[in-house]
Amino acid sequence: MIVYSIAEITILVLTWLILYRNSHHKYQGCRDMKMDGLRLQIIAPPMLLLLEKLRISQRFPIFFFKIQRSVQKISGDKRGANILCCS
C-alpha cells in the first residue's frame, strides 16, 4: 500500500516537472505578474499549458468570460486584459 502511494506521488511530481519544463518559457510573463491574494503562482505555467492543450477556453467560453470579468472587477481593466494575453 505504501509502495503504491510513493509510486503515485512520484508520477505526479514527474508529470508536474515535465509540464513545468515545457511551459515556463512560454508563460514567463504570467508567472512574473504579481497579483495580491493569488496563491500557488508556481503552478500557473503548467496549468495554463494544460488549459491551452485541452482547449478548455474554446469548449467553455462563458466560464472564461466570467473569470476575466471577476479579475477586472478586482484588479481593474488593465489586469484583466493581461490575463487574456497570456493564455
Image (tube, grey):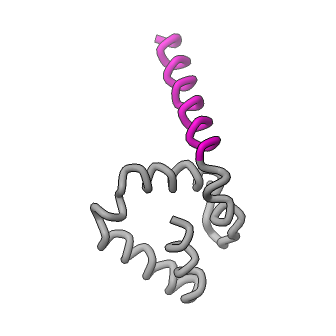
Is 56 in front, or is 3?
56
Q: Position of residue 15 (x, y in %)?
A: 54, 33
Question: In the figure, residue 76 lies in which quadrant?
Answer: bottom right
Question: In the figure, residue 85 lies in which quadrant?
Answer: bottom right
Residue lying at 52% horizontally and 25% vertically, measured from the top left: 11
Q: Position of residue 83 (x, y in %)?
A: 54, 72
Horizontally, residue 31 falls left or right of residue 56, namely right
Q: Position of residue 9 (x, y in %)?
A: 54, 26
Is 46 in front, or is 70?
46
Count of numbered badges drawn on the protein: 0
Residue lying at 44% horizontally and 56% vertically, measured from the top left: 52
Q: Position of residue 48 (x, y in %)?
A: 51, 56
Residue 12 is a magenta residue:
yes
Question: In the figure, residue 82 lies in which quadrant?
Answer: bottom right
Horizontally, residue 34 falls left or right of residue 18, namely right
Residue 14 versus residue 53 in the image, above or below: above
Residue 11 versus residue 46 in the image, above or below: above
For the record, the magenta segment spans 1-22
